[in-house]
Amino acid sequence: MTEQTSTPPNAEQQEALRQAWVREQFQKANKFLAEKGVIPSKVVPAESRYLAPYVAMWKIESKQPSHKTYWVMSGDLPSDYVDVSVAATAREALRHFSLTWQLKAENLVQSGATKDPTQAKFAQLLVSRAESLYKIQADDKLWG
């Protein structure tokens, strides 16, 4: 009997995996915006940030329903978006989403909506991801 060992991906393979993840998150962000009635026109890559495989923060300009710019978040968490006027940078946008999600979760609890098991799970997910987002935005090493 032979044991199979998996070798860790080399740098080139890691980069290919990261690029595939970034493309997937870009598609996810665009689909999310389209579902909200926002038609993206272009991304601002210099101001977008990616921490694969956890979170991508996109700065995306829209052409419909009006010309606006948004921070759009995708990754291993619920997708969300906000007008760029609330945050000057991707890091500030992560902080905004973290605080907003904590408030949304608390509102679900206060309203009694968490009596529904689905809403209770959603509130727990929001709190968990909000805490993770806060840690990411607070880590200066990630933002060099």
Image (cartoon, rainbow, N blue to C red):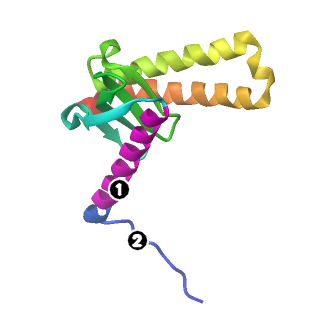
Q: Position of residue 121 (x, y in %)?
A: 70, 31
The residue wearing badge 1 is: 20
Residue at the extreme left: 46
Mark 2 crowdedness (10 Å alpha carbons): few <14, some 14-19, many ≥20: few
Camera-side mark, 2 or 1: 1
Q: Amino acid at mark 1?
A: Ala
Q: Position of residue 15 (x, y in %)?
A: 28, 57
Number of residue marks = 2
Observer able to see residue 54: no
Q: Classify residue 119 as left or right of residue 65.
A: right
Magenta part, dominant SS: helix
Q: Amino acid at mark 2?
A: Thr
Residue at the extreme front: 65
Residue 27 or residue 78, whichever sits in front = 27
The residue wearing badge 2 is: 7
Q: Secondary structure at mark 2?
A: loop
Q: Quadrant of residue 30?
A: top left
